[in-house]
Image (cartoon, helix red, strand yellow):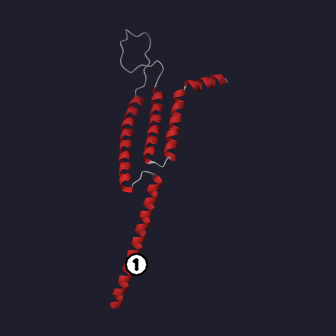
């Protein structure tokens, strides 16, 4: 193959390039962002790219919907587009919307509990809470040991 035919082939499949760029952009947003809302948006962008990729793979040039046609009106074989990728992606869209709704509901709950939707602030607050609980446990254990020692001293 010559370079021009390779370039023409790559340009002819621009929809796959768009899918790859959207996937990498969504993946980058999920990894690089500390904001939980932005992470959900990145996941949605990634999911949209995957759906576009599957729909692009299922499309056949010159293909029609898989509906029975009158043989008298058609000369030659009829080319059908496979409906399975489209049907599966409709299911993926529904699951994606439900996942996004659940994620947003969890973000609202996290905002109420921690007062922030930034990942670093939530982790810092959680670590501070854990350290406070450990200090309280140590203090109560020391108090219990003193109480037990005092009771044994009176006995």
Q: Residue at x 35, y 88 (%)?
A: 152
Q: Position of residue 116 (x, y in %)?
A: 41, 53
Residue furthest toward the front? 115
Q: Residue at x 52, y 31 (%)?
A: 18
Quarter holding the N terminus? top right
Q: Residue at x 39, y 72 (%)?
A: 137
Q: Quadrant of residue 99?
A: top left
Q: Quadrant of residue 88?
A: top left
Q: Position of residue 145 (x, y in %)?
A: 38, 81
Q: Is residue 122 or residue 57 the one in the foreground?
A: 122
Secondary structure under the numbered disc 1 in the rendered image: helix
Q: Count how many numbered circles sit on residues in the image.
A: 1
Quarter holding the C terminus? bottom left
Q: Is residue 93 above or below residue 36?
A: above
Q: Position of residue 84 (x, y in %)?
A: 40, 29
Q: Is residue 105 visible?
A: yes
Q: Position of residue 29 (x, y in %)?
A: 50, 43
Q: Is residue 58 above or below residue 50?
A: above
Q: Is residue 71 above or below residue 107?
A: above
Residue furthest toward the right? 2
The local crowd at label 1, few if under 14, some if 14 to 19, many if 20 or more residues have their Cα within 10 Å, is few
Q: Is residue 1 visible?
A: no
Q: Residue at x 47, y 28 (%)?
A: 56
Give the residue number, with chain letter if any, for mark 1: 142
């Amino acid at each position: 193959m010559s370079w021009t035919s390779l370039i023409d082939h790559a340009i002819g499949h621009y929809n796959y390039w768009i899918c790859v760029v959207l996937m990498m952009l969504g993946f980058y947003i999920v990894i690089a962002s500390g904001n939980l809302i932005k992470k959900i948006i990145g996941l949605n962008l990634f999911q949209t790219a995957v759906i576009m990729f599957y729909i692009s793979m299922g499309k056949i040039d010159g293909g029609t919907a898989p509906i029975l046609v009158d043989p008298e009106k058609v000369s030659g074989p009829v080319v059908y587009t496979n409906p399975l990728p489209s049907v599966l992606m409709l299911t993926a869209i529904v699951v994606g919307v439900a996942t996004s709704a659940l994620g947003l509901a969890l973000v609202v709950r996290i905002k109420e509990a921690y007062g922030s939707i930034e990942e670093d602030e939530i982790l810092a607050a959680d670590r501070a809470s854990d350290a406070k609980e450990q200090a309280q446990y140590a203090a109560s254990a020391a108090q219990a040991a003193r109480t037990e020692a005092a009771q044994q001293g009176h006995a």
